[in-house]
Image (cartoon, grey):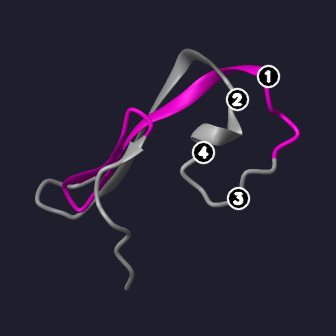
Amino acid sequence: MKAGSAANITIFDAGREWVVDSGQFVSKGKNTPLEGYKLKGKVVATIVDGRIVYKDDSVRVEAVHG
């Protein structure tokens, strides 16, 4: 990254444990073979063009295309 340049960043917590619950998926697709599994490591935030678009399991803005 370079100061002043646009950047998209994903913040990943490698130690965060969570249980897969397809009912909590942001995606319209809910099928998963991992339902109920306890996993370690989770995306906690995504920043696009300086805006937080995803944080703590919720989408913060509408999808931007283009």
Disc 4 packing (10 Å; few <14; some 14–19; many ≥20): few
Disc 4 to disc 3: CB gap under 8 Å: yes
Q: Which residue does the numbered mark 2 point to in the structure image?
A: 20
Q: CA distance from mark 2 to mark 3?
A: 14 Å
Question: In the picture provided, is 40 more to the left or to the right than 15?
Answer: right
Looking at the image, which residue is at 68% across and 32% down?
21
Looking at the image, which residue is at 70% across and 29% down?
20
Front-most of 60 and 51? 60
Q: CA distance from mark 4 to mark 3?
A: 8 Å
Provide the residue span drawn in magenta: 32-57
Q: Which residue does the numbered mark 1 point to in the structure image?
A: 37
- Residue that protrudes farthest toward the right in the picture: 33
SS state under label 4: loop
Front-most of 62 and 44? 62
Residue type at numbered disc 2: Val
Q: Which residue does the numbered mark 4 point to in the structure image?
A: 25
Looking at the image, which residue is at 54% across and 16% down?
16
Disc 2 to disc 1: CB gap under 8 Å: yes
Residue type at numbered disc 4: Phe
* Quarter the C terminus occupies: bottom left
Question: In the picture provided, is 13 more to the left or to the right than 56?
Answer: right
Disc 2 to disc 3: CB gap under 8 Å: no
Quick check: is 41 in the magenta stretch? yes
- Residue that protrudes farthest toward the left in the picture: 4
Q: Residue 33 location in percent, x, y?
A: 88, 40
Residue 56's tag is: none
Question: In the picture provided, is 41 more to the left or to the right than 56?
Answer: right
Residue type at numbered disc 3: Gly
Front-most of 57 and 10? 57
